[in-house]
Image (cartoon, rainbow, N blue to C red):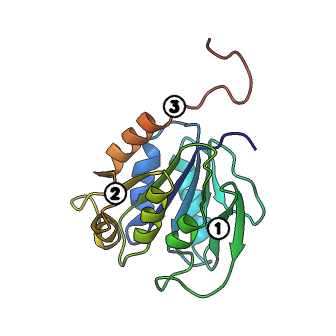
């Protein structure tokens, strides 16, 4: 596998609207996005459709064994934890709940490992509890960049606050500014589908 930039997002209460605000302000970028939203299997497909309607990149439910592709957004399905084998292959597993939830952002984030094949960014958005806090600490520890949503824009500040309290968060921002920061951290999507490349 070549270089793959990966962005993992953990989010819960207030998540669908916050994700629409984030992805609605983000042009296609050279990264694969994995979204871990605390949802049930009855809701996941509808939420993926709703995000797909506003995002500039295609959104779909993650499938077991699928390889991450830049310029795509993968939503963890309800009722499964999502791990990233070798930082780029999706593995869905049932197992016990973590932080009282399934899927859990901590499970996804803590499955990432060195060596990194590209940029790695972890983000924790609005939500109750502490899921994603230890995940961001792990991402920071293996050389990634970490972002948490600010208190003012959060529906519930539990998850971002827990992440900030670890001391491992690089940036604390509202969703629109997170989108802008991602544009800074990730070069805009190049002509990976073909065509002329700038020299």
Mark number, residue 159: none
Left or right position of 153 against 83? left
State which tag comes first along the sequence, 3 or 2.
Answer: 2
Classify mark 1: helix, strand or loop.
strand
Outermost top residue? 199
Classify mark 3: helix, strand or loop.
loop
10 Å neighbourhood of mark 2: few (<14), some, or many (≥20)? many
10 Å neighbourhood of mark 3: few (<14), some, or many (≥20)? few
Circles 1 and 3: CB atoms closer than 8 Å = no
Residue at numbered disc 3: 187
**Residue at (50, 74) in percent of width and height:** 38
10 Å neighbourhood of mark 1: few (<14), some, or many (≥20)? many
Q: Real-space Cα distance between discs 3 and 2?
A: 21 Å
Outermost right residue? 65
Total labels drawn: 3
Q: Real-space Cα distance between discs 1 and 3?
A: 25 Å
**Based on the displayed image, in which of its 4 quarters is residue 192 positioned?**
top right
Q: Nearer the viewer, residue 65 or 18?
A: 65
State which tag comes first along the sequence, 1 or 2.
Answer: 1
Whether residue 169 is situated above or below residue 160 in the rendered picture = above
| Front: mark 1 or 2 | 2
Mark number, residue 83: 1
Residue at numbered disc 2: 169
Classify mark 2: helix, strand or loop.
loop
């Amino acid at each position: 596998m070549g270089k793959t930039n990966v962005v993992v997002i953990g989010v819960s209460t207030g998540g669908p609207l916050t994700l629409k605000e984030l992805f609605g302000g983000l042009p296609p970028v050279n990264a694969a996005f994995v979204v871990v939203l605390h949802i049930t299997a009855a809701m996941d497909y509808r939420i993926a459709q709703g995000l797909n309607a506003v995002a500039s990149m295609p959104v779909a439910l993650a499938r077991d064994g699928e390889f991450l592709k830049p310029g795509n957004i993968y939503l963890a399905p309800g009722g499964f934890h999502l791990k990233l084998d070798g930082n780029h292959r999706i593995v869905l597993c049932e197992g016990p709940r973590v932080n009282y939830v399934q899927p859990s952002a901590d499970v996804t984030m803590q499955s990432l490992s060195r060596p990194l094949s590209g940029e790695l960014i972890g983000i924790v958005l609005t939500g109750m509890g502490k899921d994603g806090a230890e995940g961001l600490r792990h991402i920071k520890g293996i050389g990634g960049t970490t972002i948490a949503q600010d208190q003012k824009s959060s529906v519930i500040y539990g998850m971002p606050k827990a992440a900030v309290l670890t001391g491992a968060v690089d940036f604390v921002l509202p969703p629109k500014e997170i989108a802008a920061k991602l544009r800074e951290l990730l070069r805009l999507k190049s002509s990976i589908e073909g065509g002329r490349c700038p020299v």
